[in-house]
Amino acid sequence: MKKISIKDIAEFCSSKTALVGDVTKISTDSRDVDENTVFVALIGERFDAHDFIGDVLEKGAKAVVASKPVGDDERIIYVEDTGKALLDIAHGYRKTFNIPFIGLTGSVGKTTSKGMIYSVVNKKYNTLRTAGNLNNEIGVPKTLFCLEEYHEAAVIEMGMNHFDEISRLSRTVEPSIAVITNVGTAHIENLGSRDGILKAKMEITHGLAKGSALIINGDNDMLKTVCTDDYEVIRFGIDGENLHMKAVDIKSDENGSEFKAVFGDEEADVFVPAVGIHNVYNALCAMCVGKKLGYTLSEAAAGIREFEPEGMRQKITRINDMIFIEDCYNANPDSMMASLCALETIKNKRSFAVLGDMLELGEYSEKAHRQVGEKAAATNCEWVLTYGELATFIASEAEKNGCKAKCFDDKEKLAEFLFENLCEGDAVLFKGSRGMKMEDIFHSLYKKLGYESDNT
């Protein structure tokens, strides 16, 4: 973070202070405070950082932003709501940078799309991107505070569980380009319907200046209904209508996908180093961003080739001529379907889908799990192995549609089953919601196979 005055910080959150001087850190963690810090005392469901203000002041913090009476120390800046103040400070700091800001959201693939967009943008611009999953009302400000004088662009991921969250984030970021990767069923329990999800995702335009680019998936059944004269709508896809960026001649295997990208009269050959047709969409999305920043199609394609997956998102591990897809960061019906399609593209002898519960689906839960089971059978899985109570619906439906299936309530027993039944040439997918910790299964399996995993 570059230097910023305490007076400016107070003004950003509609407050005043007599303090003078600059700081180089905004923190919400009382353990991460020094004499160059302004501490923002957030109030959460299980904590109240106001309880730590005394400790923070003793550590020498330059100032504290608080919403409750905690004394008359001149270093305390009072506001009505510290959560809103954090967003306001982040917005004020962001406004000190005159660089492209790309904001993106979507039901599935946000982080992968973010990575591909970064790979493209960073070819020409020194680019900041959201780290990990810091895409909420604490994570987005934290990302913005990482902006330095040398940054020339920023790619900011925005997530949500409820209405108005993306609206607040978009107004904080004020993206110059907005991206919606897709509209699926994630968080349908809170948003009521897919129409509600579309409405929530479209909140990304609330901070977008009129006439700016809105990049959307033209093949998505919900997004293709978007029609507005307020923004320059750019559609990407494979077989939709009125597409601006299109992929043709797609060829996929366990190493990734090759295709020809077409944008108007311009064409370029593209290689995506990630499996699955959904990653073709992510690449198209990123290339649209490149075009808006003045790239040739070939320059954007060169950025895609340099993409590297983050964390446990479709990481490919090869052991004894077996292929393992580690995709355990999170799961919802759309990402489950996409991962099963990715598994199908791998031309190995047999395929095993190791699937865990998908959480936060509410009344839609049983239906969604059964749909995944049906899809698993349709993609010709040899075995569907499930972990978790909800995932039993996956196994039941897979078996009903002609696939072998087995349910487990013990991860070690599931790993042992794989160890005893896998052969050279098999392919295995591990997928489930973050709370299921499906990586425990492949870590155990790899140990039995005598392989040292990067994440053990």
Image (cartoon, rainbow, N blue to C red):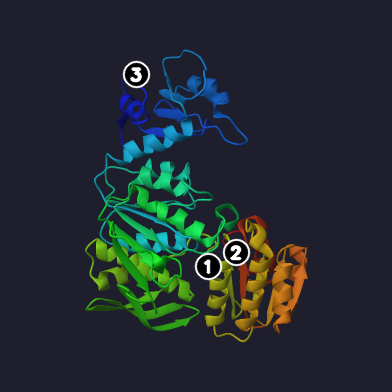
Q: Quadrant of residue 396?
A: bottom right
**Mark carried by residue 453:** 2
Residue 369 shown left or right of residue 199 in the figure? right
Q: Is 350 or 42 nearer to us in this picture?
A: 42
The local secondary structure at tag 2 comes to loop
The local secondary structure at tag 1 comes to strand
Q: Is 445 or 278 nearer to us in this picture?
A: 278
Instruction: Please give the residue where the numbered disc 1 appears in the rendered image.
Output: 315
Instruction: Please give the residue where the numbered disc 3 appears in the rendered image.
Output: 19
Q: Residue at x 75, y 77 (%)?
A: 420
Instruction: Assess whether mark 2 and mark 1 are in contact (beta carbons under 8 angstroms).
Output: no
- Location of the C terminus by quadrant is bottom right
Instruction: Assess whether mark 3 and mark 1 are in contact (beta carbons under 8 angstroms).
Output: no
Q: Earlier in the sequence, mark 1 or mark 3?
A: 3
Q: Quadrant of residue 326?
A: bottom right
Q: Earlier in the sequence, mark 2 or mark 3?
A: 3
- Amino acid type at circle 2 is Ser
Q: Quadrant of residue 273?
A: bottom left
Q: Residues within 10 Å of mark 2 (few under 14, many from 20)?
A: few
- Can residue 357 be seen at all in this image of the molecule? no
Q: Residue at x 31, y 43 (%)?
A: 148
The local secondary structure at tag 3 comes to loop
Q: Residue 125's spot in the image, x, y percent?
A: 27, 56
Q: Residue 347's spot in the image, x, y percent?
A: 55, 85
Q: Residue at x 44, y 70 (%)?
A: 220
Q: Earlier in the sequence, mark 1 or mark 2?
A: 1
Q: Residue at x 22, y 79 (%)?
A: 265
Q: Residues within 10 Å of mark 3 (few under 14, many from 20)?
A: some
Label 1 and label 2: CA atoms lie apart by 12 Å
